[in-house]
Structure formats: C-alpha cells, structure tokens
Amino acid sequence: MSTTGKAMHLAALFPSNQSAGWRDPRSGDHSDFATFTGLARTAERGLFDFFLLADYPRLTEHRGAVSEVGTAGELDQITVLSALSTVTERIGLVPTVNATFNEPFDVARRLASLDHFSNGRSGWNVVTTSNAWTGENFRRGGYLPHADRYQRAAEFVCAARTMWRSRAADGPGLFQHDGPQFRISGHFTVPAGPQGCPPTIQAGDSEQGREFAASHADVVYSRHRGRAGHAFAADIRSRTARQGRGADQVKIMPGVSFALGDTDEEARDNARAAQELAISPQLAICYLERTWGRDLSSHDPDGPLPDTDPERAPDPSEWPGIAAAEARSARAQKWRSYAAQHGLGIRQLVMKLTGGKPFVGTPARVAQQMTDYVRSGGADGFVLVPGYAPGGLDEFVDRVVPELQERGSYRTAYTGETLRDHLGQSTQS
Ligand SMILES: Cc1cc2nc3c(=O)[nH]c(=O)nc-3n(C[C@H](O)[C@H](O)[C@H](O)COP(=O)(O)O)c2cc1C
C-alpha cells in the first residue's frame, strides 16, 4: 500500500519493562515527578501525539523473588498524568488501565476527570494483563480465563462509553449497561469532558486481542516491526474493515527503541552498549531459566547454552505460568542451534532475543527508515521507547524530528488541541 506523503504519529512510552533503564547512570528516580516532567515536556517539544505510561500492577518476579527488572517502582498513573496536565499544554496523556481488575464506573470517572483537567488530552490504553498472579494483589488470584478477559474488556469499554455519553447532553442523564460481565446503572458523576469519549489504545496480540482492537480501539500499540509488522498491519486493517470501520480509524503504532550516533558505526556501538546495560549477566540466566524450568545459576553467562533438555514438569509453585514442556523443548533447540550457528554465548543470545528491531543510525538514516516504513504501509507511526528518562528522548527530538519534518513525514506544529485532534479524528460524544 503506498501512503506517500502521509504524516506519521509519534508517542513516547515510560517506563520500559524490558530495558531496566533505571540502571542507566543517566536515569532519574522513577518516583520523582521531575523524571516524568522532563520526558513529557521533551515529547511535547517534539510535537508527539501522546505520552503513554505502561502499567505493571505487580512487580516482576522470578522464582518467588522480585526480579531486578521490577524494582524501580510503579506510581499510580492517573495521579502522575493529572499532575503532568498542569505542566504540559498540548500532548495527549495516556494511562494504561487494565480492564480485568478495575471497575468501569471508577475508571470512567477518573479518565473523564483527567480529560477535564487536561482540556481534552486524556486517552486510555486498555489492557487485559497477562499475568495470573497480578490478581493476587487484588484478592482474586488467577482471575478470568484469557478469552473471558477480552469479553470483559469489550463490555468494560462499552460501559465506560455509555457513562461518558450519558453526560454529553446537558444535565445528568441515566446510564444503564446490562451484559454478562456488568449490570450497572445510575447517574454518572462527571460532566462530559472536552473529548466526550477519550480515545482508546489497545495492546494485545492474540486473536481476541486483535478483534477487540478492530472493534473498539483508536490506536493499536503493537510489538511487531519489520516484515512481521507489515503482516500485522494488514491483518488489523482487514479486521477493522470487517467491523465496518474505516482503515484510518485505527492507527497502528509499534513500540520501538532507537540508538543514534554521528556515524552509523557510533550508533551501532551505542545500541550494543544499551543492550549490555539492559541485560545483566544475571538477567540473561533468569531469561533462560524461564524456558529450562530449572536453576541454571551455575552456568557461565558468557558460555554456551545448557546442552541438557528443559525440565519436563517443573514445580508449579516455583515456576508459575511456565509454558508446556513441548513448547519449551522446541524453543530450547531453536535457540541452541541459532547460538551455535552465530557463535553466541547465553547473554549474547538473550540480548539478540530481547533487542527488538530498534532504529539504529545517524539521525538522517533513522528518519529515512521511519519514513519508509510508514510510507510502505507497515505502520501509522511509532511509540518510541527511550532507553532511560528523563533525558533519553532529547537527542531524538533535537536531531531526528527535524529530519522527519524535512522529509514531509511529520507535523511542524500541533494543529489541534485534543488528543483526538492529534490522531486526526473528530470528537465523539
Ligand atoms: C505492546 C504491548 C504492550 C503492553 N503493555 C502492557 C502494560 O503496560 N500493562 C499490562 O498490564 N499489560 C500490557 N500488555 C499486555 C496486554 O495487556 C495483554 O493482556 C497481553 O498481551 C495478553 O493479551 P494477548 O493475549 O491478546 O496478547 C501489553 C501488550 C503488548 C502487546
């Protein structure tokens, strides 16, 4: 599909679960408002559509202990974004709020409040949350099977929209929602915000996740890049059309990191250094243990992969949620032959597996790669994942954004006030 001349959409994500960016000496405290302010303001200076907060409502664990990835802290997002709404003016503010452990009334009220305070800049990244043990924080344990989570999420979004619309006309009208998951009615407490219904973003990859996106989302935040990203975009667009929605109504924005340099070689060195910082030797071993289902701490992180097969039946109390033995065994074999073929040790292999497909190069090269990807139909834009915060986006905004603008593939000023405006959508009431 040729989309020459089409302007891309950009967003910034914080924090990144994978990168353990807090270990970077340039990182600010993840509980310090200045860290959030610095990043959001830089993204706004770069004319980004929105600032997205990822949400991990339970610290990442490995074999019953908190993993080093999860120790930086996870503040409540709507609190953070409400505060940010007072120090930013145009950028969209998007919390990740899961539809599995929350209630529609509460979420609708908080998002409508954020929409008021931000003058129409709130959004909602609707996730279902994959970790069963997250539920233990909410006293429900492994709550709801996977497919039911999406049914609940779809109803959750419909119920929230019903509440928002009930206040679109003057005065408090009645809302009512009757479905298998929720039977709720009443008067919604918050007057309609500037956007009516804040835009929804979806992040989830399964069959049900994709259908949910095609039916309900304004943006899909995906993890697919390269050729897989093209296939993913085509799939989402055809599902969207089947739902009777226009292809442009759902923006596809893969998450992507980047490494810049004055030369391509310097950028490659920077990319390698960032990966080495993100994947510590211990983390590399932990990553492998999730497939082998046993203690691998005696293995040298720079040495070869274990030549024994994964544990067939690991103790579920120590290895909750681990994949079936056949799948782990096939994965182990694939990794072993890939590592042998490319001469990689454990840590190098894990860096390869977790590195994604970052944009790497001079600012001009990165701008061209991004432009080409969008023009060839692979995406409508990107959710950029800086390696650290608050300074990790500065170089991109200062050096890549002007290159994108020069190519005519990115806006040179905000043309609207609300997040819906930035996404190129009319306000829904
Ligand atoms: C790119 C991406 C980002 C995600 N971010 C979060 C997040 O911040 N918090 C969260 O609880 N789940 C997050 N998820 C997980 C989704 O909530 C989803 O529940 C999970 O992927 C299972 O759904 P699926 O089977 O459709 O993929 C993310 C998923 C993707 C693909």
Image (spheres, rainbow, N blue to C red):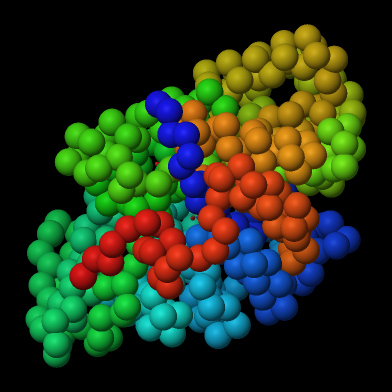
Question: Compared to 194, does 136 lie above or below?
Answer: above
Q: Between residue 279 and residue 165, name the one nearer to us.
A: 165
The image quadrant where one finds the N terminus is: top left
Q: Is residue 1 visible?
A: yes
Q: Between residue 232 and residue 301, name the one nearer to us.
A: 232
**Quadrant position of residue 416:** bottom left
Spot occupied by residue 34 in the image (x, y as percentages of width and height): 72, 78
Left or right: residue 295 versus residue 49 is: right
Question: Compared to 145, does 80 lie above or below?
Answer: below
Residue lying furthest bottom in this view? 171
Left or right: residue 163 versus residue 84 is: left
Q: Is residue 322 visible?
A: no
Spot occupied by residue 429 in the image (x, y as percentages of width and height): 21, 70
Spot occupied by residue 63 in the image (x, y as percentages of width and height): 67, 46
Left or right: residue 12 versus residue 175 is: right
Left or right: residue 164 versus residue 126 is: left
The residue shown at (58%, 16%) is 330
